Amino acid sequence: MRFSLYIAKRYLFSKSDNNAINIISIIAALGVIAATFALFVVLSVFSGLKDFSLSFTNAYDPDLKVLPAKGKKITLNDQQYHEVLEISGVKKASQVIEEKVLLQFKDKSSPAIFKAVDSNFLKTNQLNKQLVYGEWFGDGLYQVVMGSRLQRDLSVGIRDYSGLLNIYVPKPGKGQILDISSAFEKASTSVVGIFSVNDELDQNYVIGDINIARELLTFKDHHISAIELKLDEKADIEAITTSLNEIIEEDIIVKDRIALNDSLYKMLNTENLAVYLIFTLVLIIALFNVIGSITMAILDKRHDLKLLKNIGATKNQIVSIFFLQGSLMSILGGFIGLILGFILVLLQLKFSFIMFTERLPYPVKIEWQNFVLVIITITVLGALASRIAAARVKKLL
């Protein structure tokens, strides 16, 4: 192997008497460099875009959310609530009631989801940092914050006391409805803040104090729709899930942040795979130049092949020379492309010379997984291309 590697390095870095072969080799090397550079940069850009997209849901979604397996209610008394807080890894817990409602402001109305929360809600997420106008509602007050698109649909102003925001929910019960006004429970509230997170939340959600929902839905004090948990960074989610099932006597479903945004994560992972496959195809096309370069080198060195065979080199050793030459060209080109891509991403992170908007730099992120993926891809595909090219040596021996 040392003999083959030595000859391969000599062939790789020495000039051929045929200038056309030198040009083909340069083009092949530049193609590998450019393709590797593009693959790493695009993966880094997508990593940045993925984090940018998830940053909005992370501002709203808790680390864990406990939901009823059946129905709309979970029974959680004060003792159980304190036991939940004492679970190792749980930092904060917020009780939540969610229900579909009808909102009315003056002559406009819209269906929405009313999310009623307790005073610990902002300790489990950072939704108050997503407020674009106004402020967060006060504890125990008939005040709400709502999504920006929902606010535009209803033309609601912040602290607009010329008209209150009415929240309607159907009254439970059976029988014929004779008076439409007696069919709904109503709460009149004031809008004090507008948030903007993503299209779904901005269009559908209004958030207020949990006592409003208890009165509207006639929920008892120990009845809630969900529990949202803030966890330590090193918390054991499986152990916490087991503890929650032991504390809460009803059938529950425990979802982490990924499960809460299952469709979003699937979409991002699918896009990531598609981008990787597309640029891997570009790399494969670039490696065809390597195959052509090695093939031309074999033809150019056919007199050397007879000499190597006469001095005792085996057929496998001669094949290995050109296999190693192609592999070295691919790996060195890939290494240079990887360094150039890393420098470009680093410059973007530091100087933000490419802007997404006037104030937002194009998001990129350096991840070690991208380095490993690019290195493995160029190594495997480069070796495969070199093997295909080197196999032609046997026809000349």
Image (tube, helix red, strand yellow):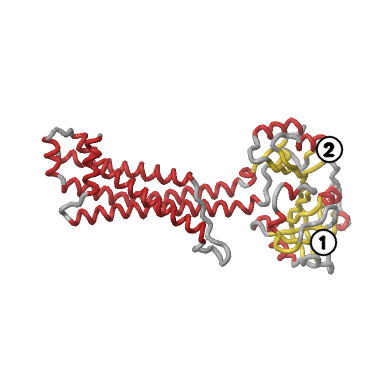
- Read off the residue under disc 2: 78
Q: Residue furthest bottom?
A: 162
- Read off the residue under disc 1: 190
Q: Is residue 34 above or below residue 315?
A: below
Q: Position of residue 222 (x, y in %)?
A: 83, 40
Instruction: Using residue 296 as the reference point, say whether residue 281 is left or right of it.
Output: right
Total residue callouts: 2
Q: Residue at x 36, y 42 (%)?
A: 379
The residues tagged by marks 1 and 2 sit, at their Cα atoms, a distance apart of: 30 Å
* Tag 1 secondary structure: strand
Q: Considering only order in the chain, which callout, 2 or 1, is on the residue closer to the N terminus?
A: 2
Q: Residue at x 83, y 64 (%)?
A: 164
Quadrant of the rendered image containing residue 104: bottom right
Q: Position of residue 228 (x, y in %)?
A: 72, 44
Instruction: In the rendered structure, find residue 336 and report the number of the disc placed on it.
Output: none
Q: Is residue 77 above or below residue 340?
A: above
- The answer to whether residue 62 of the structure is visible from this angle is yes
Label 1 close to label 2 by CB (< 8 Å): no
* Tag 2 secondary structure: helix
Rate crowding at label 2 as few (under 14), some (14 to 19) or many (20 or more) other CA atoms within 10 Å.
Answer: few
Quarter of the picture containing the C terminus is top left
Q: Residue at x 37, y 45 (%)?
A: 378
